[in-house]
Amino acid sequence: MSAYKFSVVTERDSDGYFAFCPELQGCYTQGDTYEEVLANIKDAIHLHIEDRLENGEEIPQVESVSLTMMEVVV
C-alpha cells in the first residue's frame, strides 16, 4: 500500500461546496457541508488512484503548490 499527497481546492457558493484535485484531471465532487465535500473528494481521489493503478498509469506527484486570491477590478 502507498500513500500519496494531492492538493485539493474547495469553493463555497450558495448551493454548498465544490472540491477538485488539480493534479487529477476530472477528479471533483460536491457536498452540502465542508466536512461532506472533504470526505467526498477523498473518496473520489481514492477511486481515481485505484483506476490509474489498475490501468498501469502513472500517479502524478507535485512538489509544490501555490494558491493565491487575486482581486480584479473591471
Image (spheres, rainbow, N blue to C red):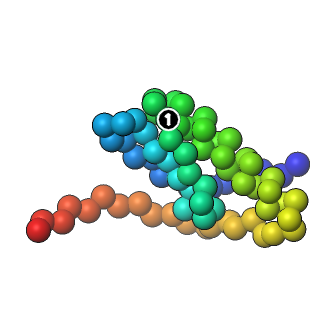
Decide which of 6, 64 is in the foreground and name it. Answer: 6
| Residue 70: image location, x then y, percent | 26, 62
Residue placed at 18% from the left, 66% from the top? 72
Residue placed at 79% from the left, 62% from the top? 52
The disc labelled 1 sits on which kind of residue?
Answer: Gly
| Residue 29: image location, x then y, percent | 55, 45
Residue placed at 68% from the left, 41% from the top? 43
Residue 73: quarter of image: bottom left
Residue placed at 55% from the left, 38% from the top? 38
Residue 30 vertical placement versus 74 (above, below): above
Residue 16 vertical placement versus 44 (above, below): above
Task: Note whether residue 8 is visible.
Answer: no
Decide which of 21, 7 is in the foreground and name it. Answer: 21
Q: Could you tell me how many numbered marks the image carries?
A: 1
Residue 64: quarter of image: bottom right
| Quadrant in the picture for the C terminus | bottom left
Residue 69 vertical placement versus 60 (above, below): above
Residue 42: quarter of image: top right
Which residue, given by chain and number where applicable, does mark 1 sit on? 31
In the rendered structure, the answer to whether residue 53 lies left or right of residue 7 reads right
